[in-house]
Amino acid sequence: MKSSFLKYIFVIVVIGLVVYSVYLVYGKKDNNANDYETVKVSKEEEIIDNIRIPIVKFDTINPILSNNAQIQNISKLVYEPLLTITEDYKIELCLAKEWSKVSDAAYVIKLKDNVKWNDGTLFTAKDVQFTIDRLKDSNVKSIYINNVENIIGVEVIDNTTVRINLDREVPFFEYNLIFPIMSYKYYENEDFVATSKNINPVGTGKFKVVNDNGNVILK
């Protein structure tokens, strides 16, 4: 009877040691993993808070005016077009929530509601009209000039609707609507080309521009 009792105690002790060993091995791994994830998230938050990018031969941060390839790449973080093109060359909505071809030479674009510029003002159809008018201005030498060469007029129907009239039917014209939209209110009564406001222009994208002594900072 005594021998059986001792065997029973021995088995319990062995099981306890095995459980404790397993806990030491796997429990520490889990704790270390949690610690690592905490540090990793913290570093990611720190990284995306403020980005500094060096630019060679800087001309202007205004993407309508700039001929610098680096600026054009950076501008995609700050400014948004009506439509974008995916890697498989399909149209994707951006500032536009829908578009339709209403005749051979006319398109109606419906804009997303409640989109704001990073200065807090509301994005409207007037911004689209303003941007196209600037692109067609002979004083503005933009890389996007070919995108609007067939546009003969832009009508603001309401705050979120714009009609674009063409001089003729242009197959797949919607693929031209990928230029960045600029703020009408921000540039109101300003010389679009020469204004000092081009140092810190506003966009609707996830980042905003801050110019610090020649350093373009995206926040």
Image (spheres, rainbow, N blue to C red):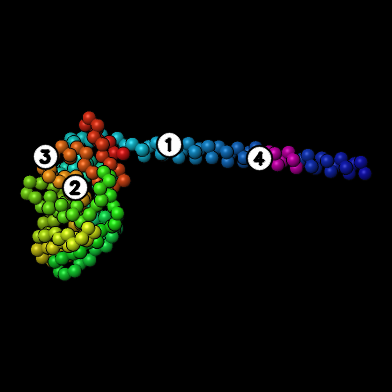
Residue at 11% from the left image edge and 56% from the top image edge: 149
Name the residue carrying label 3.
194
Labels 3 & 4 near each other (Cβ < 8 A): no
For marks 4 and 2, give the CA distance.
63 Å
For marks 3 and 2, give the CA distance.
16 Å
The quadrant holding residue 109 is bottom left
Quadrant position of the N terminus in the picture:
top right
User: In the picture provided, is 12 more to the left or to the right than 80?
Assistant: right
Q: What residue type is labelled 4?
A: Tyr
From the viewer's perspective, is the residue at label 3 or at label 4 nearer? 3
Residue 95 in magenta?
no
In this picture, is 18 found above or below 171?
Answer: above
Residue 10: % across, % down: 82, 40
For marks 2 and 1, give the CA distance.
37 Å
Work out whether residue 43 can be spotted: yes
The quadrant holding residue 88 is bottom left
Residue at 15% from the left image edge and 65% from the top image edge: 106
Q: What residue type is labelled 3?
A: Ala
In this picture, is 7 found above or below 109?
Answer: above
Name the residue carrying label 2.
185
Name the residue carrying label 1.
43
Name the residue carrying label 4.
23
Residue at 38% from the left image edge and 37% from the top image edge: 47
Q: Residues within 10 Å of mark 3 (few under 14, many from 20)?
A: few
